[in-house]
Amino acid sequence: MPTQTSTITPPDEQVRAVALERLDGLAKPLGALGRLEEVGAWLAACQGVCPPEPVERVRAVVLAGDHGVTRAGVSAYPSEVTAAMVHAFVAGVAGVSVLARQHGATVRVLDIGVDADLSSAPADVTAHKLTRSSGSIDVTDAISRDLAVRAIAVGAEIADAEVDAGAQLLVLGDMGIGNTTPSAALIAASLGLDAAAVIGRGTGIDEAAHDRKLDVLARALARACDDDRRIEDPVQRLAALGSADLAVGTGFLVQAARRGVPVLLDGVIACAEALVAAGLAPGAEAWFLAGHRSTEPAQAHALAALGLEPLIDLGMRLGEGSGAMTAVPLVQSAALLVREMALLSDLVGP
């Protein structure tokens, strides 16, 4: 039987309705602020108050891990880059770090499954390390089911720490060479798709690497899935086709939703985690907002299944949470417009 937690309490629909009514009364033509109105009402519903509070405490968590499929040549970069990038996050020079500083957000990087000894990094970075890399999913499960269960619990613990620190908006980032392959596999196995429907260019691979990636994905799905290419149990899906860091991300998203804190999703990795999270805890997706549209085809399938439309489409494919972080000012603006913009009736009377 599929493993599933209890359903998630949704954002407050009554407050959303109040926010939409307020938006209609602002000093503007009806609907003139476009999707900012939708986002503002969603924020109000998530906070349970209208007008919503300003979104000032944005906290990003980047989960780092290596993936066994990298050895099959599915990425343009070697796995050693993952560890190097962890140090870049610590130094504050990664892409998402630069964007976070601009927007007043914090970034926390955690080594979940990096195939390297990062003991020289600050203790917090390695405090949740679960493994070094994962199995190559075309020939074996990524991790054991027991480790997947443990990883989900670790993700919940990490989310709790961020919420307890006062987060009003969370961003889930990723770092791991080869991680678009297991993410695409998770999306395919969640939705019953074949490898050709979800394969993308990842870090910018050439045709030869693209062919290798397609073969790896096809063999992974054939190995792990039944005839309709699905694994109904979300935990087993993470174990067979995911990784420890992807399982931690899934647990993080479920717990954020359970705690009632909205999450701005990044690209294909976060969307794969969100899709599995919705399977584990139905209704969790109501607490997610899609930050950006990535260039990965698998993300489009996940977004459609989750009922989400990205805020921005800039052709970004960096990962790290960078696309979501780029969209943070739009979320902040949406809250302020609902809160601070004048009502038409206050300007011209009833």
Image (cartoon, rainbow, N blue to C red):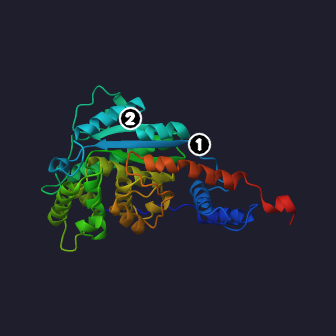
Question: Which badge, 2 or 1, comes first in the chain's sequence?
Answer: 1
- In the rendering, at what x and y percent does residue 209 appear? 20, 54
| Amino acid carrying mark 2 in the image | Phe
- In the rendering, at what x and y percent does residue 129 appear? 28, 38
Residue 139's place in the image compared with 85, above or below, is below
Q: In the displayed structure, does residue 280 sit left or right of residue 48? A: left
Measuring 34% from the left and 53% from the top, which residue is drawn there?
269
In this view, the mark in front (2 or 1): 2
Q: Dot 1 corresponds to which residue?
A: 56
Q: In the displayed structure, does residue 171 sit left or right of residue 295? A: right
- In the rendering, at what x and y percent does residue 308 appear? 46, 64
Q: In the displayed structure, does residue 189 sit left or right of residue 330? A: left
Measuring 39% from the left and 49% from the top, which residue is drawn there?
252
| Amino acid carrying mark 1 in the image | Glu
For the C terminus, the image quarter is bottom right
Measuring 59% from the left and 46% from the top, which residue is drawn there?
55
Say how many tags the image has.
Answer: 2
Q: Residue 89 bears which disc, if any?
A: 2
- Characterize the local packing of mark 2: few (<14), some (14-19) or many (20 or more) Cα atoms within 10 angstroms: many
For the N terminus, the image quarter is bottom left
Label 2 with label 1: CB-CB less than 8 Å: no
Quadrant in which residue 121 is drawn: top left
- In the rendering, at what x and y percent does residue 187 appear? 31, 63
- Characterize the local packing of mark 1: few (<14), some (14-19) or many (20 or more) Cα atoms within 10 angstroms: some
Quadrant in which residue 201 is drawn: bottom left
Quadrant in which residue 56 is drawn: top right
Along the line of sight, which residue is nearer the eye, 279 or 111? 111
